[in-house]
Amino acid sequence: MALKKKGERLMNITKNREENKLTVTVEGKIDSVTAPEFEEFIKENIDGVTELTLDLSSLDYISSAGLRVLLLTQKRMNAQGTMKVTNVNETVSEIFEVTGFSDILTIG
Amino acid sequence: MKYKENGSELTIYFEGHIDSANAKEIEDEISAVKEKVRPDKLVIDCENLQYISSAGLRIVLRLMKEIKPITIVNVSSDVYEIFDMTGFTEMAEVRKAYRKVSVDGCEIIGKGANGTVFRIDRDTIVKVYVNPDSLPEIQRERELARKAFVLGIPTAIPYDVVRVGEGYGSVFELLSAKSLAEILSKDPGQFDSVLKYSVDLLKTIHSKELPKGEMPDCKATVLGWVDFLKDYLPEAQYNKLKALVEAVPEDNHIMHGDYHMKNVMLQDGEALLIDMDTLCLGHPVFEFGSIYNSYIGYSELDPENVRKFLGISFETAKQIWDRTVRSYFGSDDEDFIRSVKDKAKVVGYTRVMRRAIRRGSMSDPATLAVVNNCRKHFDELLPRVDTLEF
């Protein structure tokens, strides 16, 4: 993996909310540096959401810190609705596979 | 054809291309081997198989009718696709080959008794195990770490298992972190904050519960140590020790099993637990027994031990032990603190004594000194400890 230039954003999050449906698109990398920001974003936007979709098509890498946020989000959504992870690319899919996350998340 | 016998299990090795040109010959060879070995379990190792045509698959199909179970292992991605498309992955257990990783020229990050840790790229490290038969151990540790992670214990989740030369390795992400022991040994002024991280994480671990059997049982392990001491303790003491451990109620909370400041890493203000191979379920008294040993029990006769191990003085280690107990229970009631410590020591010395005898010999003065010190502590502790519960 090429080194990112200093100052380049490691992660970029966008959202699309339609009533109680929320789609969050995460690009770049979720690691220990960016995971807190991702967690914060989810917390701020998840109230009243019953259908959460995480679009990971442009996610390059996810570390344990990122997986923990997914886990917490999944637990939260279990209580208030459903959560789906979509457009998972090969690299991230392999991480889900080897960590056993593919059994925990709904990947579609 | 290369093959290997292991009792009634036969492993045959598929190599190169298997197609209509050589299928007949290969099947005849397999038949000859089968006649000889008469296996009731068959493993087909495909490490060096590049291609298999339908003529080859028909051989496997006929074998499946004859021998159950058949396991197909070390399958490359290309060959796996063939097995998958033709439905073989549903009829037999087909296992992909482990990814091969070379550590030539990679930076060495750490070296331990079990293996060496290399950095393989910017984000990942691989722990290469010394023992080439370490696969079951690797799988066990990974499974424990995964369970803990899913329960919300902060740790680095292991990625895949890889083949490194003749051995195996486990891939983890690289933590940009320092251990609490390292932080404390460089800056003793950090004592309070390091202690808080350590105790908070310990409480988080202990707050998690799993169904019985999901992880090893601490109590069973400790009972094993007690039994080991049967011939080395006066009968009455052995009986009391055994009764104390047996009376500890069943508890399915998670214990780390080897909790000390070298096994807690601090990354971006978050404490992460490492070395998950000792995770078990049980009552916290067992954890406190092991914590006591890390700071005091193993170093009592040789205070240099804790300096070598954690990079801190024995005085500091004793303070960590005392403050850990007070802070964990949120109490400064001296009678209570002393009683908790006594209980932990009973567990601790059971282990110290067994370890000294197992590693040394009773005719060795150093071993004898440790054993006698443990006996002295049992003489003091056992009369006043009536339960290990707290």
Image (cartoon, coloured by chain):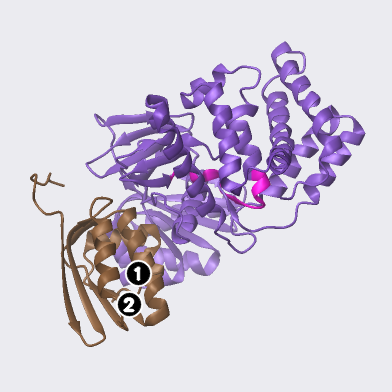
Chain colours: A brown, B purple
Name the residue nearer the viewer: B266 or B3.
Answer: B266
Residue B239 located within the stretch drawn in magenta = no
Q: Is residue B312 left or right of residue B20?
A: right
**Residue identifier under label 1:** A73
Inter-mark Cα distance, 2 to 1? 8 Å
Q: Is residue B60 visible?
A: yes
Q: Residues within 10 Å of mark 2 (few under 14, many from 20)?
A: many
The answer for which chain carries disc 2 is: A
Q: Which mark is residue A102?
A: none
| Image: B130 above or below B387 | above
Q: Residue at x 23, y 41 (%)?
A: B121
Q: Residue at x 73, y 24 (%)?
A: B357
Magenta stretch in the rendered image: B273-286
Residue most toward the top?
Answer: B365
Question: Eyeballing the image, is B103 above or below A7?
Answer: above
Residue A65 position within the rendered picture, expressed as x and y whole percent measured from the top left? 32, 54
Give the chain letter at badge 1: A
Estimate the x, y position of residue B11 in percent, counting from the top left. Answer: 49, 50
The amino acid sitting under disc 2 is Met
Residues marked 2 and 1 touching at CB (< 8 Å):
yes
Q: Amino acid at mark 1?
A: Thr
Secondary structure, mark 1, is helix
SS for callout 2: strand
Q: Name the mark on residue A83.
A: 2
Q: Nearer the viewer, mark 2 or mark 1?
A: 1
| Location of residue B53 by image quarter | bottom left
- Mark 1 or mark 2, which is nearer the start of the sequence? 1
Question: How many numbered discs?
Answer: 2
Outermost residue, right side: B236
Which residue occupies 69% across, 14% down? B366
User: Dot 1: within a 10 Å radius of its alpha carbon, few (fewer than 14), some, or many (20 or more) residues?
Assistant: some
Where residue A24 sits, quadrant-wise, is: bottom left
